[in-house]
Amino acid sequence: MAAAPSGASRHLPRTSCKGGKVSGGGKKLTRATNGRFKGGYTTRHYGEPARGVHAVQLELAMRGYMQEPQSPSPDNWPPPYGPARAAPLREILQRILESCLTFASPT
């Protein structure tokens, strides 16, 4: 989502998103568009679509790239980064960023 300081916003192109699901690495992950952080500070403060300045705000749950322990304690928190666990998310993020670059490239 891109937003102007006035709060006006418009959607940037989406990548392979259908019905709240995105896929990467053979996994289906859920997504929320305009969810909890709808029109957040980042997009309002930095986005100026009328001037060609677009802002994207992504919020990622750590369970997409780390194995959350059943019972967090000082011995197991924070959990280590899991490259294999993160691979599907990295694939999705790469497609999103490539789409943003395509959107932002002069034609």
Image (spheres, helix red, strand yellow):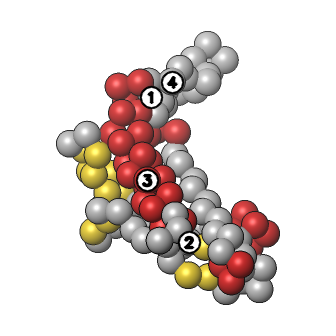
Q: Is residue 82 left or right of residue 71?
A: left
Which residue does the image show at 79% across and 69% down from the upper left? 45
Which label lies toward us, 3 or 2? Answer: 3
Q: Amino acid at mark 4?
A: Tyr
The residue tagged 4 is: 81
Q: Residue furthest front?
A: 107
Q: Secondary structure at mark 2?
A: loop
Determine the residue positioned at 72% across, 63% down. 42
Helix, strand or loop at disc 4? loop
Task: Say which of marks 4 and 3 sits in front.
Answer: 3
| Residue at mark 4 to residue at mark 2: CA–CA distance | 28 Å
Q: Which residue has dot 3 on it?
A: 98
Q: Which mark is residue 67?
A: 1
Residue 76 is marked as: none
Residue 29 placement (x, y as % from top left): 33, 51
* Label number found at residue 1: 2
User: Can you tell which quarter of the image residue 48 is in?
Assistant: bottom right
